[in-house]
Image (cartoon, coloured by chain):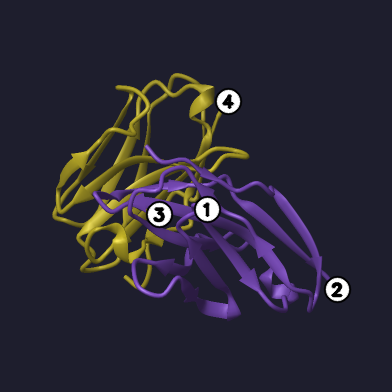
Chain colours: A yellow, B purple
Amino acid sequence: GAGVSQSPSNKVTEKGKDVELRCDPISGHTALYWYRQSLGQGLEFLIYFQGNSAPDKSGLPSDRFSAERTGGSVSTLTIQRTQQEDSAVYLCASSKRTGNYGYTFGSGTRLTVV
Amino acid sequence: AQSVTQLDSQVPVFEEAPVELRCNYSSSVSVYLFWYVQYPNQGLQLLLKYLSGSTLVKGINGFEAEFNKSQTSFHLRKPSVHISDTAEYFCAVSDRNNFNKFYFGSGTKLNVKP
């Protein structure tokens, strides 16, 4: 597609439920990144994919968080047993190659855990 | 790990006035430097980047930034702002040895008044 597409744009979920956030990168972009933007905070790195593999998962906050990427394209970030502190905007970005060329970001998914 | 400091959380300025948004990072090791802009309800857009070469980098919309290695700074400037520049601006840094992980500042909200 023309840009990085994320869905849903907004998600309200009850504490303890699982959620899936989807990212559809720009066609041909091999690198895909997930970041989290909490209120009043900068962006926090979560994970990145090169193709379908994730060389760096160091930013995932806990084992409740996981992500996968299939076909070198769409990625899903899954948060199990959501907690209120998971409330944030989850941003996906992609780039043609690794990140020194700068990312193209999606508009994000605003997750609210109530 | 890098840390990025944007000292000013909000900068109010009148239209056509000059502006400087400050960014300092923690390490003097070789880095790549970026500024992103986030307009209301939109994703982040790359404004400019420094990879190597001239320390003065020009970006879109008349913005420029200067890399100062001795002061570990990458301040963003514009000589004359417009109402349409109202947005949040994020500084980001990545290590040249691990350029797949970006470290972002907490953002500066630029509010241009008529």
Provide the residue designation for mark 2. B114
Tell me the quadrant of the picture where the C terminus of chain B can be found. bottom right
Provide the residue designation for mark 1. B71
Provide the residue designation for mark 3. A6
Tell me the residue at 35%/46% (across/down).
A34
In which quarter of the view is residue A47 placed? top left
The disc numbered 2 marks a residue on which chain?
B
Provide the residue designation for mark 4. A114
Q: Residues within 10 Å of mark 4 (few under 14, many from 20)?
A: few
Up/down of B89 relative to A34, above or below: below
Q: Could you tell me the amino acid type at mark 2?
A: Pro
Q: Could you tell me the amino acid type at mark 1?
A: Gln
* Structural distance between the alpha carbons of marks 4 and 3: 22 Å
Tell me the residue at 69%/49% (across/down).
B8
Check whether the beta carbons of the residues at disc 4 and disc 3 lie within 8 A of each other.
no
Q: Residues within 10 Å of mark 2 (few under 14, many from 20)?
A: few
Tell me the residue at 48%/55% (across/down).
B70
Q: For this rendering, which residue is in front, B110 or B77?
A: B77
Q: Could you tell me the amino acid type at mark 4?
A: Val
Q: For this rendering, which residue is in front, B76 or B102?
A: B76
Q: Residues within 10 Å of mark 1 (few under 14, many from 20)?
A: few
Check whether the beta carbons of the residues at disc 3 and disc 1 lie within 8 A of each other.
no
The disc numbered 4 marks a residue on which chain?
A
* Structural distance between the alpha carbons of marks 2 and 4: 39 Å
Q: Earlier in the sequence, mark 2 or mark 1?
A: 1
Q: Please indicate whether residue B104 sits to the left or right of residue A40 in the image.
A: left
In which quarter of the view is residue B82 placed? bottom right
